[in-house]
Image (cartoon, grey):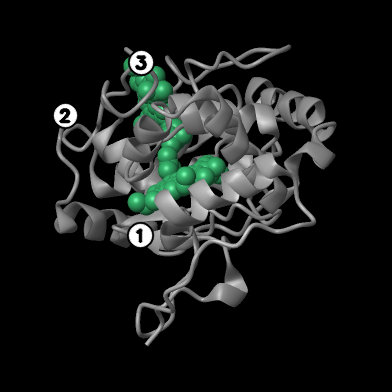
Amino acid sequence: MFFDPERFEPRDDRSPAWNRGAYIAEGLSHCSSCHTPRGPLGEELTNRLYQGASVDGWFAPAMTAANPAPVPWTSAELHDYLNTGASHYHGTAAGPMAPVTQGLGALSAKDQQALVTYVESIGDGDARAAHTASAVSSALDVDAQDRSRMASAGGRLFVAACASCHYNRAPDVNPNRPELGLNSAVFLDDPSNLIRVILYGINAKDGAAGIVMPGFARGLTDDDVASIAGYLRSTRTTKAPWPDLAKQVAAIRAAGTGEIR
Ligand code: HEC
Ligand code: HEC
């Protein structure tokens, strides 16, 4: 019902690089099949192209300007994230996105650049590049000035389980330990990505070369994971709290799709 056989048609009003990138994204890489919400019959809702969608128990974030990460997705950030699986400010490609970046890493430099040209145009991140410095400094300030952490169960667990790796100090972020105050997983309306990363970690194959994050599925209870996620949400963002977190952790565990590493 929803498949119309057709050839890719380049747009005259766009550069050859943009058209090549669109061809790679829409044809070979089918980026939109994960990042576009689907209707009741599984059809991609083309009027909500790239607005973000659930896939295989993860959430593929919006690639439009609605992406919730505080630092804009500039060409430079997209280039590193898509082709190496990790970027300076946005962290790591985990879950179903990891194999995508491994595939893109094998493209020629010219095709990688073409894909970046196209993807950048979806969210127009370069136009907001100047926001990067202020987003980074406010995330680092929040972290440095968070005096409340020992006052809550979630904050104390965060210190014990996470802060030994996830700390950064002004003036910049160490890309080998993603700044959680800048990571989409903490800002999305759907907490699945954050819960999954806490439970199952990131293995050496999926993340940045040679770097791993341990999983906590065995060491933390559902309530522990929920309270860390809730703590990050309330201290790192101004977004509404996630409802029923412990239940969502239990459901993800019960689905049993992540391996314990
Ligand atoms: C198989 C499903 C799938 C496909 C295909 C896919 N993605 Fe993703 N993508 C995801 C998921 C899931 C995430 C979240 C990963 C995480 O949290 O680490 C993601 C994350 C991203 C992010 C980071 C968003 C953020 O705010 O952190 C970008 C950018 C992105 N994808 C671009 C692309 C592009 C470009 C393509 C096509 C070349 C593509 N994706 C293909 C599932 C997919
Ligand atoms: C031993 C060090 C270590 C500990 C402890 C640790 N992490 Fe990580 N974490 C990492 C590394 C390294 C990465 C990046 C992985 C990579 O690039 O391969 C990461 C990545 C992440 C990401 C980003 C995932 C993405 O898709 O961008 C989140 C979110 C995260 N960690 C949350 C946590 C939380 C919450 C805790 C505590 C429960 C925690 N981490 C404990 C090392 C750690």
Q: Nearer the viewer, mark 2 or mark 1?
A: 1
Which of disc 1 and disc 3 is earlier in sequence?
Answer: 1
**The disc label shown at residue 19, or none:** none
Relative side of 69 to 220, left or right: right
- Judge whether 49 appears above or below 56 on screen: below
Determine the image quadrant of residue 258. top left
- Judge whether 23 appears above or below 47 on screen: above
Q: Is the CB of mark 1 within 8 Å of ligand 1?
A: yes
Q: Which amino acid type is shown beneath numbered disc 3?
A: Ala
- Cα separation, mark 3 vs mark 2, equals 17 Å
Which of disc 1 and disc 2 is earlier in sequence?
Answer: 1
**Mark 1 secondary-structure assignment:** strand
Q: Which residue is mark 1?
A: 55
| Residue density around tag 3, few if under 14, some if 14–19, many if 20 or more, within 10 Å | few
Q: Which residue occupies 42% across, 14% down?
A: 164
Q: Which residue occupies 26% across, 39% down?
A: 199
Q: Which residue is mark 3?
A: 209
Q: Which amino acid type is shown beneath numbered disc 1?
A: Val
Determine the image quadrant of residue 239. bottom right
**Can residue 27 be seen in this snapshot?**
yes
